[in-house]
Image (cartoon, rainbow, N blue to C red):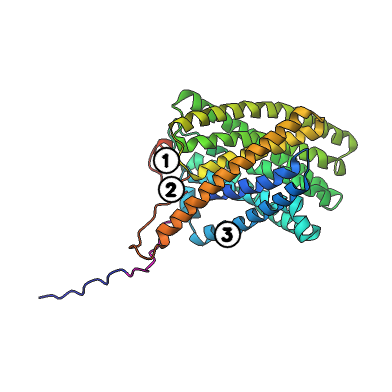
Amino acid sequence: MILSVPARPPSPTARRPTRPLLGPSWFAAVMGTGIVADAAVALPWGFPWLRNAATAVWLGAALLLVLLAVGYLRQGAARSHAADPVTAQFFGAPPMALLTVGAGALLLGKRVIGLEAALYVDWVLWSLGTALGLVTACAVPYLMMTRHRFAPDAAFGGWLMPVVPPMVSAATGALLVPYAPAGQMRLALLLGCYAMLGLGLIATLLVLAMIYGRLVHHDAPTATVVPTVWIGLGALSQSVTALGALAVAAPGALPALYARGGAVFALLGGLVMWGFAMLWLALAAGLTARTIRHGLPFAPTWWSFIFPVGACVTATGSLAAQTGSNLFTWAAVVLYALLVLAWVVVAGHSVRHAARHVRCVWCPRAEPRVVPAVHPCPGFRSAVCGREAGGSGQG
């Protein structure tokens, strides 16, 4: 007779390893929170209380960035996320989070930590965000071409995420141009920002064409994917913001003739791109309203509502400053009010979602169980991939 030792029952307080709960898409929460703060500075009308509130929001975004960065690096899931054809698209969120918080340090944080410290923080975050964004803009499309497989109706707004960071680098880098050493260093920074604007804008237009074709030729996207359509608004608006910011920075680095040309290009090109952005805004709003009638469950993709609207505020504010038009002034104010309202709603749902998952993972009275990670587009992965891709599909 063979005696076997019975397995020890699990301890009520034992903690079993879980699948990673953090994905790169959650850095969109930092982007969204940061743009709420940064966009307040771009408003044509300034209020002391608004700047104070925006500074507090920027501090919250900076803290959230640190928490998410530490949590994501500790779980070591980047390789599995890169293997997933949907999750890999959201690798564009971390660099844009770094850039947004860095710009906030210079725009708002200098009142708290001083100009010298704010410049140091912005230089560090801008450099990291730009390097990571350029790697993402090259690596993710390369993976799409060589490793990932997609169904004919695979294109969705998330495909814009890897290629938009260089445009954000251009817009935020323009803020640093006056602080760069005069001469070749300042000129190189300005020209590099213009080059990154071109990189991101042309790539954005290519991807928007694919997304538009998918929306026209196939069924409407599923509920949790619809918010990603708004990313197109953010990409187009970011180009307007970058053009305006670079036009302001150009006189300190370029000859007067070219600086004046940059201002003309910023105004005329900005107006053209702003008009296209308004078309995309109307399409995205229509699809969202249609989806809400059938149910729009919460997902990390809800943060796709926030940063694009914030970028639209900064773009509209830039055009208001260039033209003095009351139309753009009022449009910027109305859009900012909608931005704040949307941010409150999405942030509230995110906090409840995070609290619910923390209770599920660390509940001491129930037997621990594996909690499935939240995919950025739950229910969409099978429709995106022509085959089941490797990776865990964490959100």
Residue 3 location in percent, x, y?
Answer: 15, 76
15 within the magenta span? yes
Q: Earlier in the sequence, mark 2 or mark 1?
A: 1
Q: Which residue is mark 3?
A: 67
The dominant secondary structure in magenta is loop
For badge 2, the amino acid type reads Gly
Q: Earlier in the sequence, mark 1 or mark 3?
A: 3
Q: Residue furthest left?
A: 1
Q: Which residue is mark 1?
A: 381
Numbered range of the magenta stretch: 11-21
* Label 3 neighbour load within 10 Å: few <14, some 14-19, many 20+: few
- Observer-nearest of 53 and 81: 53
Q: Is residue 23 visible?
A: no
- Observer-nearest of 361 and 157: 361
Cα–Cα gap, marks 2 and 3? 22 Å
Q: Earlier in the sequence, mark 2 or mark 3?
A: 3
Please state if 288 lies on the left or on the right of 249 as rendered: left
Residue 242 location in percent, x, y?
Answer: 73, 39
Q: Residue furthest right?
A: 256
Residue 18 location in percent, x, y?
Answer: 40, 59
- Observer-nearest of 360 and 258: 360
The secondary element bearing badge 2 is classed as loop
Cα–Cα gap, marks 1 and 3? 28 Å
For badge 3, the amino acid type reads Leu
Give the residue drawn at x 73%, y 31%. 330
Give the residue drawn at x 50%, y 40%. 144
Cα–Cα gap, marks 2 and 1? 8 Å
Q: Tell me, yes or no, whether the two marked residues, 1 and 3, touch with CB atoms within 8 Å.
A: no
Give the residue drawn at x 65%, y 27%. 278
47 within the magenta span? no
Q: Which residue is mark 2?
A: 393
Q: Is residue 26 visible?
A: yes
